[in-house]
Image (tube, helix red, strand yellow):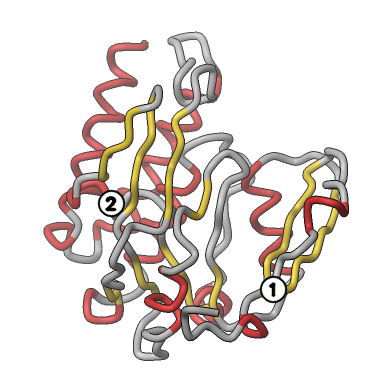
Amino acid sequence: AQRRVDWDEIRVTVVNDGGHMLPISLMGGIPFYVEQISKDQGGVSSARNYGMEATEEPWVMFCDCDDCFSNVFALEDIMSVLNDKYDMMWTKVWEEEKGQVYQIQDIRIMVFIHGKIYRRAFLEEQKIRFDEELSFNEDSLFNATVMARTTKERIGEISCHYPPYVWIRREGSVTGCMDADDRSAWGQFMRNMRITEEIREHKPEQYPGMVTRMAYDLYFMQMSS
């Protein structure tokens, strides 16, 4: 009530990817619309695609089940600047690891979907979806595809008083347990190849963070092989 946010403009869709529905008691007192939908287990990419196709809102923002939206007051900052002249808008992001919270460096911020909000019409026009063959770094491919198919002028920063998204690193996560025998590591290599093709015909100097991450991942593959 202290912020000028129209809750009727907020819709949250929870995708249960082969899991159990959340108890209704958890939804008590929430001022915005929450919908739960279920599907057969297919992984994070499949869940995101399913949720995106199940809704029709003009802007889409993704939040992993182990992350959180840190500050409801930042909603006003986000909602007040959404503009059709942008295909994607982004905010600063907190990263939490083992209880320590710090802000992700700008050079890395464009690699992830965290803290990004995407114009649905653009995603539909370009037929951009998550690659359901990838179990990790699928968001890097998604974001690289978005940036390769738009222009720098159509990517806007949202200045929030406090970074709204908290990306929580978990021990035992897929990305934290990779080794040379993990087949998903080769999925990562193929993702890099696709990103390279996407960016090759554009201007890679616009996205130094993406290029740096690609080089790091390719180095990892060499060390693993």
Residue 102 shown left or right of residue 78 in the figure:
left
Q: Residues within 10 Å of mark 1 (few under 14, many from 20)?
A: few
Q: Could you say where residue 101 lies in the image, as x and y percent from the top left? A: 32, 36
Between marks 1 and 2 in the image, the one whose residue lies nearer the viewer: 1
**Residue 37 figure quarter:** bottom right
Report the side of 99 relative to 199 (left or right). right
Residue at label 1? 32
Amino acid at pointer 2 = Ile
Q: Is residue 107 above or below residue 188?
A: below
Q: Around disc 2, counting alpha carbons within 10 Å, would you say few (fewer than 14), some (14 to 19), or many (20 or more)?
A: some
Instruction: Identify the image quadrant of the C terminus.
Output: top left
Against 7, residue 39 (above or below) is above
Considering only vertical position in the picture, is 11 above or below 19? below
Marking on residue 106? none
Tag 1 and tag 2, C-beta contact below 8 Å? no
The residue that mark 2 highlights is: 109
